[in-house]
Image (tube, grey):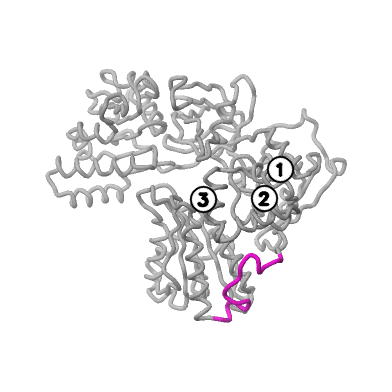
Amino acid sequence: MYTILLAAMEKTRHLLILYATETGNALDAAEQLGREAEKRGCPVHILSLDEFDPSSLPLEEFVIFVVSTTGQGDTPNPMKAFWTFLLQRSLSRQWLEKTRYAVFGLGDSGYQKYNFVAKKLDKRLADLGGTAIIERGLGDDQHPSGYEGALDPWMSSLWTVLYNEYPLFFPNGLDVSVSDVKMLHPPKVDITYLDSHEVYLQSSAEIDLKSLEREIVKSRSMLSGKKSSDKSKPNCFLKMVKNHPISRPGCEKDVRHFELEALSSTIKYEVGDVVEILPGQNPEAIDAFIKRCNLNPESYIIVKHKNKEDFVEDGVTNVPINLKRFIELTMDIASASPRRYFFEVMSFYASAEHEKERLEYFASSEGRDDLYQYNQKERRTVLEVLEDFPSVNMPFEWLVQLIPPLKTRAFSISSSLLVHPNQVHLTVSIVSWTTPFKRKRTGLCSNWLASLDPNQRVCIPAWFHKGSLPAPDPSLPIILIGPGTGCAPFRGFVEERAWIDSKPAPTSPILFFFGCRNEQNDFLYKEFWSLHSQQGKVLSEEKGGGFYVAFSRDQPQKVYVQHKMREQSGKVWDLLSKGAAVYVAGSSNNMPADVLAAFEEIVADEGGVSREAAVRWLRMLEKGGKYHVEAWA
């Protein structure tokens, strides 16, 4: 863990900005705060919460927290250790009495626990004696300008409060606009270029999985500026052995069943776990980007971060890597949209005046809404933006710093390792949509997986980890609610319990509620569920369980999983009374809240208690580790 030592810090008053992010948005917001503070002459330190020693928090006079909320109110991974520390009972109510803080949260009001992490952090800091500089800010992805719709006015208020109370904080004054600051700070990375003859090159015959692993670790460690670790190394490499559509061809949704087999290392996972996959990028887009940016694809580079106090050369990050390979493995050039600061930096490198003016406008607070419409709403890619501003010639150092990193994509595992040794199965909806200006967009990873031919050996880097759905003990009765691709983890649950049941070993009942639009179009794994619902099988009524389907569009009135739950309220209550655990998976829109409301109604009606008592009962179920939700946008 990175520890801030007070003696090593400047003695001048500074602003500490701590962030916790999963997707990168909180980091972007933290860096935006840092840049705006620096423009006003305020020294800034920006750190991820997993790089900060929480025991030194009382030594900090001013701290800004920028934290995202993930999933169903979950704490982002970089914040978990910090949050556990803050919850210690030994910390007194005066622990932070000399610390002033502000909290800005990033969330999505479409989720039930909107900005839950920011709210609970704000409360805990106050409970420990901290004094809020300003009321917490809550960014909302649903806002017409995204989280920046709340960040800009909140940041303006923050600077005003700080300046009024501590004018020395901002030697350059309070009001500084982009046009006032003509200087651009140098990029945070240095790049050393080498010709291919200066680098030992392996022949194609020598390039194996170990070499690919080293390339991934090297490139991604260089990009992050952090010492390589086991986290950056894939757990294994997979190959596609089955790519099978399970929705009817030509219907609105293309859902695939993928079967992947290990090429290296033995696969280890439990049902309910998640696999993260690093997708390949379109070779044509990579070539177009290299050409647009006047780069030499044959060059070899070493990327080093300036002023990275925690960066230690480790024999991996100081080894050259091919420039084109670095881009392929780390820079999302044809899927992710660039951030606002990208447009600000572009304005400094635009030679055409009309392009420079438009970029400066996009980077300003006045142009924020227009930028959101042009960029985020249309999901413009980095390559498309660069092509829209042909006079811009940005140094590669800036591109490495500002282009969104290529991220792994997480999928619920839909198989049991007991049933399919050395394999992992996925149930994936192939993502595509149309933007407000009728431009077709596609999801990078799902479409890449769908394009893979099982007859070709394409290596798929994979990482396995725990999700939100712990593997249930075979003796535990379970109630599963999984509409659409939310059925994925529960296919693994049913497979595994059926395998155990065949030994024979006693297993408890499974009650499963599935939902889709039409029986003919997207009844995913119909034969599988039917097989395991037969007499005496794990989903059968004879075993005390059952399988119930809601076809939402097959009748005039829409029917969803919560309606089927109410129809079977007696069975639901019977299993709950016997200590059943509840598992919910699927779309994060309204489904988790609607399912919870159905449970509240069932508990109240069948249990003969008030609705308020039912709500409390279900909260206790959740606190007891028996109500689990895994939802995705």
> Relative to the observer, which residue lies in front, 151 or 430?
151
Q: Amino acid at mark 1?
A: Phe
The disc label shown at residue 22, or none: 3
Picture quadrant where residue 117 is located: bottom left
Residue 44 in the image: x percent, y percent? 60, 69
Instruction: Count neighbours of disc 3 (C-alpha within 10 A) and say few if under 14, some if 14 to 19, many if 20 or more.
Output: some
Question: Residue at point 69% right, 50% down?
Answer: 400
Residue 255 appears in the picture as rendered: no
The residue beneath circle 2 is 223
Question: Residue at point 39% right, 51% down?
Answer: 109
Provide the residue span drawn in magenta.
167-183
Residue lying furthest right in this view?
197
Instruction: Count neighbours of disc 1 (C-alpha within 10 A) and say few if under 14, some if 14 to 19, many if 20 or more.
Output: many
Q: Amino acid at mark 3?
A: Glu
Report helix, strand or loop for mark 1.
helix
Question: Residue at point 49% right, 53% down?
Answer: 145
Residue lying furthest front in this view?
354
Which corner quadrant holds the N terminus?
Answer: bottom right
On screen, 448 above or below 168? above
Dots 1, 2 in contact, CB < 8 A: yes
What distance separates the C-alpha of mark 1 from that of mark 2? 9 Å
Q: Earlier in the sequence, mark 1 or mark 2?
A: 2
Residue 67 in the image: x percent, y percent? 48, 58
Residue 310 appears in the picture as rendered: yes
In the visual, does 238 lie left or right of 475?
Answer: right
What distance separates the C-alpha of mark 3 from that of mark 2? 16 Å
> Relative to the observer, which residue lies in front, 252 or 357?
357
Residue 633 in the image: x percent, y percent? 44, 41
Q: Would residue 182 be counted in the magenta stretch?
A: yes
The residue beneath circle 1 is 326
In the visual, does 291 lie left or right of 273?
Answer: right
